[in-house]
């Protein structure tokens, strides 16, 4: 009788000890997982780039909606003119600037900044060089034929001049190599397009 009781107590004690050991292991595993998670978060934060300054960020954040409006203007061309040279130019503008918008977005995210948007319509960008107002865009949309051609090129020349001005500011004040390369590409391409449009306008 007493021997049986001692055996039962020994078994129960062993089971309790095993349970405590198991619980202790579980707690350590949870702590380890948490520590790994914390380390990963720290690594991501530490990976944020530092090879840029405020001028780089401002340039990219302004150029994205600026490009978006140029692409919007380019899309208006095919249905409003029969001028094949202008249609080809508009296509070139869209094909150049749409990929640059993706590059801008990628750069900003790599800087730890929010992915940009084209902006809420045309309002709010009045102080941005070369941006067209809502009224100007509406007038362009309503035009057609030769009147459209002249209006579109006149507006796009002004738009390109604004982009070049922003790109020149980036070259003077920015530090990020990729942003500065983009600025140089914008200046080169858009100066060529300005010259082409001026010739088409007979200027």
Image (tube, rainbow, N blue to C red):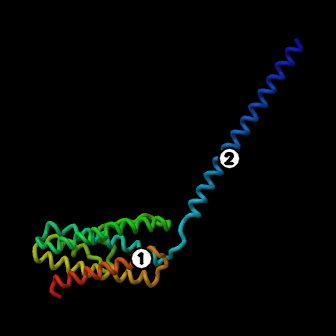
* Callout in the foreground (1, 2): 1
Give left or right: position of 11 versus 147. Answer: right
Instruction: Give the vertical position of 25 relative to 8 (above or below).
Output: below
Give left or right: position of 129 versus 155. Answer: right
Q: Residue at x 32, y 81 (%)?
A: 162
Q: Which residue is mark 1?
A: 181
Instruction: Give the vertical position of 43 relative to 190 (above or below).
Output: above
Q: Quadrant of residue 118?
A: bottom left
Q: CA distance from mark 1 to mark 2?
A: 46 Å
- Please provide percent x and percent y for residue 33: 64, 47
- Please provide percent x and percent y for residue 78: 16, 67
Q: Which residue is mark 2?
A: 31
- Neighbours of disc 2 within 10 Å: few (<14), some (14-19), many (20+): few
Q: Residue at x 40, y 69 (%)?
A: 104
Q: Residue at x 29, y 77 (%)?
A: 131
Give left or right: position of 144 versus 56. Answer: left
Q: Nearer the viewer, residue 38 or 164?
A: 164
Q: How many marks?
A: 2
Q: Nearer the viewer, residue 40 or 124?
A: 40
């Amino acid at each position: 009788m007493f021997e049986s009781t001692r055996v039962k107590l020994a078994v129960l004690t062993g089971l309790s000890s095993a349970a405590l050991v198991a619980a202790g292991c579980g707690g350590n595993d949870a702590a380890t997982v948490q520590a790994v998670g914390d380390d990963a978060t720290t690594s991501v934060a530490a990976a944020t780039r530092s090879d840029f300054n405020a001028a780089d960020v401002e340039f990219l954040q302004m150029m994205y909606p600026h490009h978006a409006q140029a692409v919007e203007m380019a899309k208006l061309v095919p249905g409003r003119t029969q001028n094949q040279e202008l249609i080809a130019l508009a296509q070139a503008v869209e094909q150049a600037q749409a990929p640059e918008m993706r590059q801008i977005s990628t750069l900003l995210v790599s800087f730890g900044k929010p992915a940009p948007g084209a902006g809420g319509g045309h309002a709010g960008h009045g102080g941005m060089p070369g941006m067209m107002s809502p009224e100007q865009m509406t007038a362009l949309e309503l035009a057609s034929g030769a009147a459209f051609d002249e209006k579109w090129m006149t507006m796009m020349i002004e738009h390109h001049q604004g982009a070049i001005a922003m790109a020149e500011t980036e070259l003077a004040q920015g530090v990020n190599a990729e942003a500065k390369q983009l600025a140089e590409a914008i200046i080169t391409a858009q100066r060529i397009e300005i010259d082409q449009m001026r010739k088409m306008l007979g200027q």
